[in-house]
Image (spheres, rainbow, N blue to C red):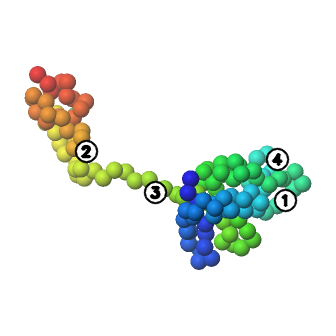
């Protein structure tokens, strides 16, 4: 897991250095508390609240939580958000095949004896 730390500019900076990541994990464990019912809580403190363990810090971060690492508004870190990208289409507008279906990827185009078709129709289009 990669960690991002917020800078005072409000931008997130990726932390690559293992020692820096370990330090942030320690800060997260110190600065964040968990209530008896398992809720993350870094504001109100009840006597039943306790600090996070390292494993809990990692679990919350991989869950997408932003954890406080200090008292400044920007003192927080999170796990790196990986943008989910759909693979680029080979045929952005779609390609209509002899079987009547439209495909968007060249890998879906099959050449059967009765014409160009999709994988679903390959058996039907093969003589
Ligand atoms: Zn088809």
**Residue drawn at (9%, 28%) of the image:** 113
Marks 1 and 2, how far apart in space?
55 Å
Q: Which residue is mark 3?
A: 83
- Is residue 85 left or right of 104 when viewed as pictured? right
Marks 3 and 2, how far apart in space?
22 Å
**Residue drawn at (82%, 47%) of the image:** 36
Instruction: Determine the secondary structure under disc 1.
Output: loop
Residue at the bottom extreme, as displayed: 9
Q: Is mark 1 within 8 Å of ligand 1?
A: no
Which mark sits nearer the N-terminus, 1 or 4?
A: 4
Which mark sits nearer the N-terminus, 1 or 3?
A: 1
Q: Is mark 3 within 8 Å of ligand 1?
A: no
Most foreground residue, 97 or 2: 2
- Is residue 70 left or right of 101 when viewed as pictured? right
Which mark sits nearer the N-terminus, 3 or 2?
A: 3
Q: Which residue is mark 1?
A: 45
What quarter of the picture does the C terminus occupy? top left
Mark 4 is surrounded, within 10 Å at the Cα level, by few (under 14), some (14 to 19) or many (20 or more) other residues, namely few
Most foreground residue, 93 or 46: 46
Q: Which residue is mark 4?
A: 36
Residue 93: x, y in percent? Answer: 23, 52
Give the mark count: 4
Mark 1 is surrounded, within 10 Å at the Cα level, by few (under 14), some (14 to 19) or many (20 or more) other residues, namely few
């Amino acid at each position: 897991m990669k960690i991002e730390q917020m800078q005072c500019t409000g931008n997130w900076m990726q932390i690559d250095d293992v020692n820096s990541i370990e330090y942030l994990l320690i800060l997260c464990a110190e600065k964040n508390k968990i209530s008896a019912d398992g809720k993350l809580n870094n504001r109100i403190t009840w006597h039943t609240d306790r600090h996070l363990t390292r494993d809990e810090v990692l679990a919350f971060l991989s869950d997408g939580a932003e954890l406080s690492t200090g008292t400044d508004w920007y003192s927080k870190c999170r796990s790196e958000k990986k943008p989910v990208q759909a693979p680029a289409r080979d045929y952005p507008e779609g390609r209509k095949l002899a079987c009547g279906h439209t495909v968007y990827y060249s890998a879906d185009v099959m050449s059967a004896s009765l014409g160009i078709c999709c994988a679903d129709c390959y058996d039907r289009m093969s003589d």
